[in-house]
Amino acid sequence: MKVIKNEITVIGGYGGGNVGDDALMWNVIKWLNVKFPNITPLVVVYDKKLILNVLKGLSYDVVDTFEDYSVESKVIIYGGGTQFFHFTKDKKKSSIIKKGFRFLLNPLSFFKSLKKHVSKKEVKSNHKFLLGIGFGPFISKETVEYAKFLNVLKEAEHLYVRDSNSFQYIPETFLSKITKGTDICYNRFFKEILVEANPEKYGNIKKTAIILRDWHYDNVDHEKLLLSLRQLISMKKEERFDLIFFCDQLDSNLKEKFRGLNNLDFWSWDPNSNNLAGFFDRMKIYDLVITSRFHGAIFSALLDIPFITLEIEPKLNVPNQMYGNESILKEPFLLENLINLISIAKDNTIVSEDTNNQLINIGDSMFEDLTSRISKLL
């Protein structure tokens, strides 16, 4: 077992091939490198091979889920995303038979999953911070998952909560150690990557991007949403669409729902062959983004691209609260409603420069406050 004693450890949904989580990871490690240049942070990830390109040029140590480790750190930062929630699984999509079939098709996935569950992992610290975190939903406050969430709140020294929605799940007794922040991608360092994006390398063909995630929970009629999107693409034959997967391993099986459409192309984030700057080079070509991934909206706003969110879960309403607009498709995901939203969105730049700058200032303040708190502990 690898035994590590260090200053700062960062934990999140990192190293799983999801560009949203990869962007959160980059922002936290970049910030730590700038603010604490003499400290090498340890980052806990799913697969260390999948972060090499993303964090290239930054200083860090890493452990992943396929090794045994025991970490004793002065400070732990839970960095971004919605790390604490509880939905009801869709039994049709999460059956043991279907999982077994996927493992037969991909034996390596089975062995990686097995190694993940049998390896021994421990990270301890007396000083825990949650940075730019979103909470919920929870199907009940009587569940084990909600009890674990309460324990996280008890153990945290301070929390920077990403959005107003999350406060409904936080008991009043914890509010004194909570600061309302924003998404981690809102900070001055990340803005530098976005400004450098160079879409010209992809030509001048304007397209609509559809960013989807494969949804395994039974809170919405996901099949109805996919049908409306397919009908939209079929109807608008004169326009070009790209179907984008932020996490190829989890989402790319959705391709089968959209085969045979001549005006549709597919592409996926691949951390093995790309980095964040390259990803945003391509993202910037779109004149509209339709997304069921939270960071699809965040990236669009930062890149000055109009967007529509698809509310497959409550988190997809958060960007509209952040930016003060109503560009969201709700159940029953009717095609006519989507068409109406598109006509409105294409005539408007959804997020103003002033709004983005205000959120960047909030993000910078969030990072600076945490810098001050950590400096007193090291």
Image (cartoon, helix red, strand yellow):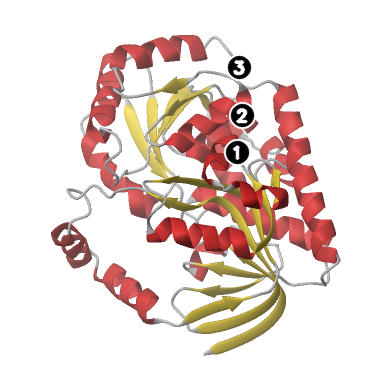
- In this view, the residue in front, 153 or 359, is 153
Q: Quadrant of residue 257?
A: top left
Kind of residue at disc 3? Thr
Expressed as whole percent of the image width and height from the top left, the position of residue 204 reads 53, 23
Specify few, some or many for label 1: CA neighbours under 10 Å numbering under 14, 14-19, or 20 or more: many
Query: What residue appears at the point 45 percent right and 9 percent down from the top-left corner?
Result: 343
**Is residue 275 visible from the viewing direction of this image?**
no
Residue 233 lies, with reference to residue 16, above or below; the image says above
Kind of residue at disc 1? Asp
- Mark closest to the chain's N terminus, 2 or 3: 2
Q: Which residue is mark 3?
A: 349
Camera-near label (2 vs 3) is 2
Q: Are marks 2 and 1 in contact (CB under 8 Å)?
A: yes
Kind of residue at disc 2? Met
Q: Is residue 69 left or right of residue 131?
A: left
Whole-number angstrom distance, CA of label 2 to CA of label 3: 15 Å
Expressed as whole percent of the image width and height from the top left, the position of residue 234 reads 25, 19
Q: Which disc is residue 163 wearing?
A: 1
Q: Which disc is residue 315 wearing?
A: none
Query: What residue appears at the point 67 percent right and 38 percent down from the top-left corner?
Result: 194
Residue 251 lies, with reference to residue 271, above or below; the image says above
Whole-number angstrom distance, CA of label 1 to CA of label 3: 22 Å
- Mark closest to the chain's N terminus, 1 or 3: 1
- Mark closest to the chain's N terminus, 2 or 1: 1
Q: Which residue is mark 2?
A: 322
